[in-house]
Image (spheres, rainbow, N blue to C red):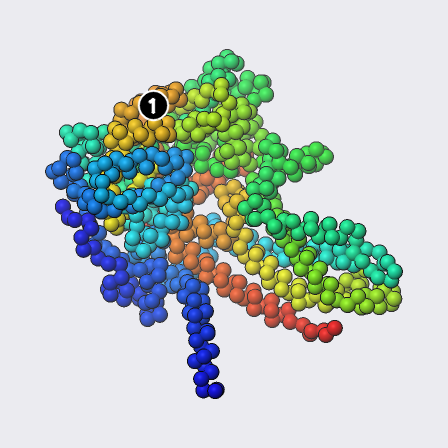
Amino acid sequence: MKHGRYPFVLSFLALPVGLYTWLVVLPFAQAFQISLTDWSGSSNSFNYIGFDNYVNLFKDERLVLPALRHTGIILVVLPVVTIALGLFFAFMLNLGGRMRQGRIEGVRGARFHKVVYFFPQVLSVAIVGILWKQVYAPENFGGLITGALTAVGLPAPVNGFLSDKRFVLAAVIAVLVWSAVGFYMVFFSSAMASIPRDLYEAAIIDGSGRIQMFFKITLPLLWDSVQTAWIYLSIIALDVFVLIYMMTPERGGPDAASEVVGGVIWKYAFNHGEQAFASALGVVLFFAALTLAVVSLRFGRRERIEF
Amino acid sequence: MTNPTADRHPIFTRRNLFGATAAGLAATSLGACATSGGDDDAEEVTVGGDAENPFEVDGSAPLDVVIFDGGFGNEYALAHQEIYNRSFPDAEIEHLATQAIAETQQPRFAEGKPCDVLDNSGAQQIPMDSLVSDGELAELTPLLDAPSYDDPEVTVRDTLRDGVLSMGTFNGKVYALNYVFSAWTVWYDAKLFRDKGWTPPETWEEMLALCPTIQAEGIAPWTYAGQHPVYLYDLFLILAGRHGGVDVVKAIDHLEPDAWRHESVVKAAEALAGLHTAGYILEGTPGIDHIQSQTAFNERRAAFLPCGSWLPNEQKGIAPDDFEYAPIGVPYLEGSVQPGLISAGGEEPFVIPKNASNLAGAYEYLRIMLSQEGAQVFGDTVQAATVVKGVELDNPAAKMTDALVSNPDDLFQPRFRFWYTKMNEEVRPALGALLSGDATPEEFIDRMQTAADETAADDTIEKFRHED
């Protein structure tokens, strides 16, 4: 029996592995090949130019370097803020309320809040982009936030948030957080639901407060979920392309103040006709993502607690 | 004359598969995917003696046409294809109307199997500079030298308006037929001006003098598409060119040293920045897109809007019924030596890929587009002028624009943003910053001169020149 097992197993694997190789591995490998050429993207001839594209990447002050900086900022801010808010909301919804007959519950209307917070997750990114573009518009053109700020006598950017170099990146990150936080709240909520209540009740009897409960019980027991959330959010952070494309002036403006790596790849590939250069940036992004996943899985590893 | 469909080299010859893959065996299979080998043996079309069918089109060969489905739609193209089928009833025409030109067509170029006729337009156009430098386009001289569709005694070239080929000319060779004739002007509402008793200004000073009067009515003098500062490109360059003459802007296009530091260019930059300093721009303008600025203009919240000559048509049905779109040239600065200069010529580039499978058919299709009937069909469907002479349009804005572009010596299209993608990416934000007050005129000039010097010094960028 053992004899015939490998062909049998292989026959199952051949198709998926073949498809994966053809549709995923080969294009990646080809992106690497292309990145060593001067291919424009609209021709079938090219020359190999070695690693010139990679060298030039880090000389491009106009698009690539700002994009790397901005993607770096998003990579740090987005997961931290989203996870912090997600945990906070989940904790409040599950354990933030008063004790009733010896049991702790979430705040009033927890189920209603859950639906409301989750709502942005249901909207497509394109709709989110259009919606917030209007919210951030100049006051003179119906912007909600600028209008509200002026109404209460606070200063607001006269040309709206998205056309102001100081605010545009923060404005985009805020939208990302807004649309992601609901999902992670639900995600953490369900993880919290699996933590036995007696742990909390014991803690209360021992006289611990809510904050202590959160840091001593909830967070350690949710570590796996937080780690997963971190990786997902990092992947989102590496590709903010759609929102930038939809919302910001000149798709990354004003004046490169919101360029991100994904958007710059697109610009080089399709606006500049420099596919090879775009591929080089793509390869860099690929390795960055890979490193990120490996690092966060390695360093995030902790002892698992059985309960 | 060669037969365009006969024995063309297949893409996957052994030479191509093995030749193009210096990266070794592993890359050999990759070579077949996106970057298959080169096909250098493209056919050429010559003009034969038959005036009815000068390119000797094979009537049974299919024709593959890709149309940018933007402001002009694609109805007119279907009409052109009908005319084509009238001569060649057996030809099957593949018609694709799309806005995603680069996304759908770039891979076909890369594969060596492009379409036959491509309307390479819109925000997603394939960059012309890279198509030309890669040698992917067929030269259009055979088309221009061919007898015209309507009169065999007149060549196609002679049926065109003056100066319309320059936009598609790259170092003396015509690679694109820019089919639509348009001009960049400043628009105002003739009814508003009549009602208030304002005279449309001729000079910059008249315009500045009128601004306080306009403001007194609660109307902002100017607005523009702040998120797309490219709408200011022609306004700015023509303002400079009117002051110092066309050579000033030509020097900029030719990346000459210190071209941006020319007195006229500096004056134009200072004049535009002055609009911001004086508060003559509708508040919030740097933060709005072209639709918002046009809406504000239609609502008479601003008196002047810089835009192209397609605007009145586009706004038909959107603007109030009593809104009268009327154009003026850029108000010229004091001491201008060429106050009639205007950015006008062909736009909407139609190209023929060099590796097209039905080259002769593609040339014939363009010849049909340039016939009186073809041009009239376009004019009737979209109310815009083509580059063909003698087609009358029945709307007042078009007639007023015609008066502005009547002197052929004054027609000039600034080209550097089409020739050099990097200059394009620099001039847009730079102009935006200049008019929003984020940059001073000196900073603006320095920035553009630096970008021009860098482009000029970069040997990897192919350089282009105007014909003299």
Give me the residue at 63% from left, 49% from top: A120
Q: How many marks?
A: 1
Q: Secondary structure at mark 1?
A: loop
The reply, left or right, for residue B123 in relation to residue B39 is right
Give me the residue at 15% from left, 48% from top: B2
Residue B195 visible within the image: yes
| Residue bearing the label numbered 1 | B393
- For the C terminus of chain A, the quadrant is bottom right
The reply, left or right, for residue B282 in relation to residue B235 is right
Give me the residue at 87% from left, 67% from top: A206
Residue lying farthest left? B49
Residue A121 screen position, x and y as percent? 62, 51
Residue A158 visible within the image: no
Q: Report the chain holding disc 1.
A: B
Residue A10 screen position, x and y as percent? 44, 77
Q: Residues within 10 Å of mark 1 (few under 14, many from 20)?
A: some
